[in-house]
Image (tube, rainbow, N blue to C red):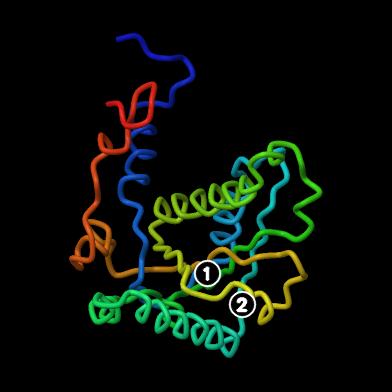
Amino acid sequence: MSMNEHAFTEAERAAVYRAIGERRDMRHFSGGEVAPELLARLLEAAHQAPSVGLMQPWRFIRITQRELRQRIQALVEEERLRTAQALGERSDDFMKLKVEGINDCAELLVAALMDEREAHIFGRRTLPEMDLASLSCAIQNLWLAARAEGLGMGWVSLFEPQALAELLGMPAGAKPLAILCLGPVQAFYPAPMLVLEGWTTARPLHDMLFENHWGES
């Protein structure tokens, strides 16, 4: 078989696919630290993500104050209780799940969309949510790089955006999208935690893949 001249070596390709396959949304952390140069490397990987119109809408806030970390955790707990109520008959099962590792992780980051995004029209005139897609790409870059470095990362979305924005002094129009727990872990889950906990099952690719028209396989 001929090799594409632009392809990575076999070992390099295997490493990329391994990072993708073994990335997990982590909730269990073992404290420790992330060396400053390693954190800088991970954030640079996030910053290399593609973005619509090269608008680079991501903003990262590193949380270093313990008291602020606790206040963020309290916001998450408030939303966890509201989510449990909204789930009705599954509320008890939901409350048994560990949904964040804010007080245990080595580093806590908040990823947000910048303010004044309406000024960026290129690629967003009909799809304004492409700014969110761009930030999501940056988070995924960070996630995969962290896995390759042996660090766990968890994306926490259980919070009221406006309350978190006010807590962190964000300007009007900026919007937090993710609370990111980052740091050493004892072990990576062998499968997504929600699968291991019996909350749901992952569906195969062929259920999501159509040809030519919606629903045609």
Residue type indicated by callout 2: Leu
Q: Is residue 68 left or right of residue 169?
A: left
Above or below residue 205? Residue 27 is: below
Q: Residues within 10 Å of mark 2 (few under 14, many from 20)?
A: many
Residue type indicated by callout 1: Ile
In the picture, the quarter occupied by the N terminus is top left
Judge by depth and name the residue closer to the eye, 124 or 6: 124
The location of residue 47, given as percent across then percent down, is 63, 49
Q: Is residue 9 left or right of residue 74?
A: left
Residue behind mark 2:
164
Q: Is residue 195 left or right of residue 70?
A: left
Residue behind mark 1:
179
SS at mark 1?
strand
Q: Is residue 187 left or right of residue 175?
A: left
Residue at the spot 37% in from the left edge and 32% down from the top edge? 13
Rendering quarter of residue 190 = bottom left
The location of residue 140, given as percent across then percent down, is 49, 50
Above or below residue 99? Residue 66 is: below
The location of residue 217, given as percent across then percent down, is 27, 26
- Mark 2 touches mark 1? (CB < 8 Å): yes
The location of residue 154, given as percent across then percent down, is 42, 65
Q: Residue furthest top?
A: 2
Q: CA distance from mark 2 to mark 1?
A: 10 Å
Q: Residues within 10 Å of mark 1 (few under 14, many from 20)?
A: many
